[in-house]
Structures are given as structure tokens and as C-alpha cells.
Image (tube, grey):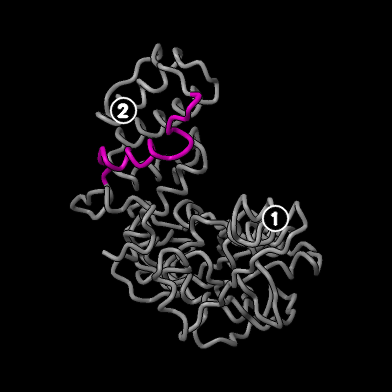
Amino acid sequence: MQNFWPTSGLAQLQRDARGWLRPTDDYFRLFLARPELAPVPESCKAERALHAGLLAAPSRPVTPAEIKAMKDADARESYALFLRFRDGLLAAGTLEAYYLSLFPRQGGGHINIPPLFIDLMVEAVVHSLLESSEDAYAVRAGEMLFRPQRISNQEGQVLSGDREVIDLFKDTGGVGDFGRFLAEAGAPLRTIELQVLTDDNAADYWQSAQRHRHLLDLTHEVTNDLSHGLVFTMTRARSGLKALASVLQLWVQHFLGVAVTIRPLQKVDDEAWRWHVGLDVEATGLLNDLYEDREVAPERMQRLVSLFRLGFANPQEMRADVSGKPVYLGLMMNTDGVVRLKPQNLLVNLPLAATV
């Protein structure tokens, strides 16, 4: 196993016969070590006792009285949310089953845990899917499924950078609270270079300390074709979009058990357009408007990062009314230049036959 994301918890999970990930006590201990739950000097006796008890037996029952006994309201809320997540995961049996229960295809799902827990589950699953990969582009693209990205355009390149890292560098020069102190004092900040992932520096990606500092090139040449979308011409031999598409293929196969091919799309010009899925909130709205032939402002259109074409290897696994038709996907940044990819959209919105 390549431990390129040491915080994912994959090493503390077990696989069932299907390859899905079962939680263990050690997996839950990772959460107990996080700053949201780890005791601080101000923690009361009840909080310390509960934390110690859960460290010893992470799956043990916890009574409402144990939560109520904690003096700090934030601590009570943090433990209540963790226990809701833990109990839901234990009841489902695997990370995948629990994730699917949060986003049921028939609708009516209820998200009652923080987004952080969902992102951590996605990180573990994607790590499992890519653990034997030696392709730095695919692994870097996999980060997009659970870490928001900030998109920038530099000399014609469309670059995807980890939002948390980009914002930290902007505010502190990449050196955290000390850098913030220097900035407030007017002192010069140490510069830490962000690198665009290339064949020449791909080996550096595997160093855990550098893993979120590589930018992924998502470049297209874009010209308008407002008949039904945009025309895209690929300009990079090692496209981050192709890498992202390969990860999404694995994601669909793993959860839904259907084989699909996903390719970055050069042109959408389909009078028989029947189905589409937005990979984020912004793209969903845009594709809906294009499908309904509503007018779309040029500024909004330009925030579309990419289109993709998804095809089923077996058309019989699709709904009969769209069998054999392509599914168009879209990825789009918001007005702040941030992409928040929602991988659950592919699981919920693909046109599957009822028998799948």
C-alpha cells in the first residue's frame, strides 16, 4: 500500500469480500486524536474521562449523561456529532454503505453529520482505489474528490490548486501562524513555491510533506459554440482532466458495480442530448440551463472548467429510455474561483436500470 495520504485512515480499515472498507477501533481512534475531540488544558474531568474511555474502547456505548456532564458546550456538540457518525458507520458496516445511505438514489437522504466526516470517508475510499497506482497525476486528481480546489489562469494554463494550501500561502507565506505574525508586523514572508505537476517533478509528489503543493494542469483551449455548450481542444499531453476522469471511472465501478468510460469532451453538439450530471452545484445549474436552451451569460459560461462524456460499457445497465445515449458531465468553479466537486452526484444521478 502506498501511503501517499497518511491521514486517510486506510491503514486502519479492513476490506470485506466486496472490497468495501470496514471500520475498526483504530480507525475511530484517529478521530479521537483530531483537535476537535482531543482534550485541551481547559478540558473538564468529565470530558477527559469520556475521551480516555473511548480511546480504550472506541465502539463502547456512551450514555447521554456522559455527554451532558461535560462543561464546555462546544465539546458536547463535537462528541455528539462524532458519536452520531460512529454509530451510523457501525450500523452500516462499511464506509461505502454508510456513504450511500447519506445519498440514496431514491431521494430523501438526511445529512446529519458534518461535511468533514464525509470528506474523510471519501479520502479513505479514493486512497483504497488508488493505493497501487504509480500515476502521480491520477493520485493528485483524486484529491479533487474531497479537497476544494482554487482555479487560476496563468499564462493560458488553467491550474487547480488545493484551496487550503493556496489560501494559507496567500495569508502567511505558507508558514502558518508565524507567517501571519510576520505579515501583521510588515516583515517579509518566506516564499514556498507551488509546482505544476509534470513528468519532471512527479516523483516529488509522493513525498507526504509536499503532497498538496502541486498544481494540476486542467488546461483547455476554449471557443464558444452556443448551439449546446462549448468547444474544447486539449493542449496538454498529460492532462489532469484525463487523470480526473480515470478516478471517476474507478469511483463509479466501486460503488455501483457498473463499468463506464469517462473522457474530457472536446465538443458538445448533440441534438439528442438526453442526460447530464453536474459534478458540482454550479455545473448542475449550468447544464440544466443549457439543456433547457436558456440564455447563459458569457461570464458564467467561462467558469466552466470542463465537460466530459460518460458511456456505459453495457448499455443494458442504463434506463431503457436512454440506453446507449451518452451522459454529459460538467465541472465548474464558483464566482470565487473554487471548485467543490461532489462525487456523490455520479452515484445518485446516473440513469441506471432498475435491475442494477
Q: In this picture, is 162 found above or below 262?
A: above
Q: Residue furthest left?
A: 17
Marks 1 and 2 sit apart, C-alpha to C-alpha, by: 40 Å
Q: Quadrant of residue 65?
A: top left
**SS for dot 1:** helix
Please tell me which of labels 1 and 2 falls first in the chain: 2
Task: Please name the residue shown 63% across and 57% down the image.
Answer: 168
Identify the image quadrant of the C terminus.
Answer: bottom left
Q: Is residue 83 magenta?
A: no
Q: Quadrant of residue 255?
A: bottom left
Q: Is residue 41 magenta?
A: yes
| Mark 2 nearby-residue class (10 Å; few <14, some 14–19, many ≥20) | some
Residue at numbered disc 1: 182
**SS for dot 2:** helix
Q: Which residues are magenta?
A: 22-42
Residue at numbered disc 2: 54
- Label of residue 72 in the image: none
210 or 338, nearer to the observer? 210
Q: In this picture, is 188 found above or below 95?
A: below
Task: Please name the residue shown 44% across and 32% down the image.
Answer: 37
